[in-house]
Amino acid sequence: MTLANSKFGTAQPVKRREDTRFLTGHGRYLDDTVPSGALFAFVFRSSVAHAEITELDITEAEAADGVHLVLTADSFEAAGGTNKMGASIISNRDGTQGAAPVRPVLATGRVRFVGEPIAMIVADTLEQAKDAAELIGFDYDDLPVHMDVSEGGPAIHPEAPDNVAYDWGIGDAEKTDAAFKAAAFTTKVEIGDNRIIANSMEPRGCWAAIEDDRLRMEYSGQGVWGLKGSLSSTLGIDKTDVHVTTPDVGGGFGMKAFDYPEYFMVAQAARTLGRPVRWQADRTESMLTDNAGRDLVSTAELAFDKNHKITAYRVNAVSNMGAYNSTFAQFIQSDLASKVLMGGYDVQAAYFSNQGIYTNTTQVDAYRGAGRPEAIYVLERALDYAARELGVDAMELRRKNFIPADKFPYTSVTGELYDVGDFHKVLNRTEVEADMAGFTARKATSAKAGKLRGLGVCYYIESILGSPDETAHVEFADTGRVNLYVGTQSNGQGHETVYAQMLHEYTGIDIDLIDVIQGDSDRIATGGGTGGSRSVTTQGTANKAVAEKTIETFRHFVAEQLGAHEVAFEDGAFRAESSNTVMTLIEAADAARNEGRDDLLNVTASTTLPGRSYPNGCHVAEVEIDPDTGVTEVVKYTVVDDFGVLMNPMMAEGQVHGGVVQGIGQAISEHVIYDEDGQLLTATFMDYGMPRAADMPMIDFHSEPVPSTANVLGMKGCGEAGTVGALAAVANAALDAMWERGVRHADMPFTPQRVWQMLGGT
């Protein structure tokens, strides 16, 4: 049953329902939900990157006006907490486990990065808490700082000799080596990927309270069930006594999917004091302590036969893991990247290795794509270099090496099973939409104005899934409204609109009667949260399943109500056989409630996807560079994406626009800078190069779908696609522009000073 032509059904450009409240000031973000009378928490942090703590005197701070509690590692543990953050550890190439040093909730004995939490002050006002922090006696003996992303140097952890967090690899090293030895041509290039900060519109924060003898935690995150489990284990509380919720969340980008020390400190303080406690990071605090992204250097090698067919590839990456392991950061920087590396190309041998290095910086989360942008960036930059070295057209080099459409399903050399794809069709459409034939004329026009113009291409493929499991629950409320409970968490992506569209399409329920409920560990028992572009595929599949189950749940009851032997469900209503008598689901729910059939009013369905989906597409960027100033401007941008079946084309385009802006931001202006002592120099928006609207081009978006076979809706995720493609497209365009001036190597970010120096400025 489908209502595909419905005004509010799927595949329709329905405007985002949630925007009305967001744009009129009626959103309910974390600060809007704090209980009255909540105490304020402020975190006293390390001012140095590496030191032994020789004194921590909180006596005066505890006696300060308005102070209720000063929490340290000792008092945290004395109250029953385990002063240890969790982290997933991967296996090294030799089969041993990666390094697993303890990351404390509150520093004990030693600090390892600027901003590491040492104590938390809880007071009546934030100003009192900050004033009390000034009274803490903190003394230390400096230790050497390790800022190089390389083996050796001053040790950060005794558990990590030479500061190596892990040494991981995948692929067939022997087969790859043999292919390189037999190759007609080989290319090799080192590619840097600059460190960036997530900078969500709403900084991280949380509040905790004791409600009915249970711990209530509300925080601005990307899912509630992971934190529920972490709070239970870290604080020694039974899971049933932990209730985690999220309100509206102002941006996540993967950064808010992690556990952070403040959540455990605030929860422990609320338990100790028996009063609500709130904490909200300011912008500089976020820049110091949020998990950052990227920050790796890769050496990529490609082997070709005499016809320029890629026979093998080899990539070695070195990743900055920061001061500690962070939840699943080891997996993000290694395994996830391998899932997509070289994914769109028909290659017979490959080897990918990655070494994680600890440094005295904050921990790394490869956000904005969880490992995918790094992998695609390396591959597409390497292909661009190879095309130049071989003297061949970059587009034709890609065409020659694409996995042909008739080879799907296709298992890649890294073990990914790609279900469908038609990369030639997408690339051909891109050439037309980007007017690549007219580039020569545009380049000449730019030259007359004294500008260097370059064109860059990136063809990407992503691996989308995360957890394959998801749950949806439909509740017919006595108010006449319908609640759809979901296991994902919107951070601004528009889930409330898309999910309501889905339920409307499959059930005929008026979209204005549907409320999407998310982020509450009591109201829905399980969920995978949001991350890795999994929401629309996993949650969408569960939404369809619960809609179908709801129809079947009511079918027999409705037949009885209509006096029919059987009823069919079509066009949004039940219809009795050989009759014009109909009953909608809303009418059926009202009838069930009137007859005491409450068992029909709540329906739950859980689904497990059999495999991943693989969105892919082509980005073409054109840049102009002023050689006198080094200013680089993206002047034309075209995207053709294969997202499979689009649930809401307008929102998919919006996701791409936002992602492209993020990618351009990293390529042109964003860069985290630390000094040699580990102090963050880009700790405000005055110093950190956030992209601005005035710096962005118009983005031309087109869809060329090949429906996925890995889910019943034919969908592929789109949340990260814009960033994944933008990095390499812009970087390749910048190098193309500077090539005529003799520049042969160029890494992001293309800030005016860096570009001017690349062009020979002194």
Image (cartoon, rainbow, N blue to C red):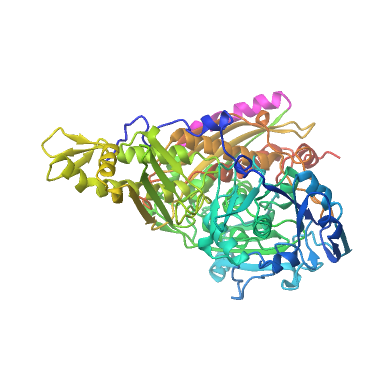
Determine whether 702 is above or below 610 in the image: above
Q: Is residue 98 left or right of residue 592?
A: right
Instruction: Judge whether residue 197 is colored magenta.
Output: no
* Magenta highlight: main SS: helix
Instruction: Judge whether residue 442 is colored magenta.
Output: yes
Residue 236 showing in the rendered view:
yes
Task: Judge by depth and name the residue closer to the eye, 82 or 442.
Answer: 82
Q: Position of residue 541 (x, y in %)?
A: 38, 49
Task: Look at the image and tell me in which quarter the N terminus lies.
Answer: top left
Q: Position of residue 669 (x, y in %)?
A: 72, 39
Q: Position of residue 69 (x, y in %)?
A: 75, 57
Determine whether 232 is above or below 121 in the image: below
Total count of labels: 0
Q: Is residue 409 left or right of residue 527?
A: left
Q: Is residue 189 left or right of residue 170?
A: right
The residue at 43%/31% (across/down) is 14
Task: Judge by depth and name the residue closer to the eye, 286 or 611.
Answer: 286
Give the extent of the magenta segment: 429-450
Q: Position of residue 228 (x, y in %)?
A: 55, 58
Residue 700 showing in the rendered view:
no
The residue at 86%/51% (across/down) is 134
Task: Look at the image and tell me in which quarter the C terminus lies.
Answer: top right
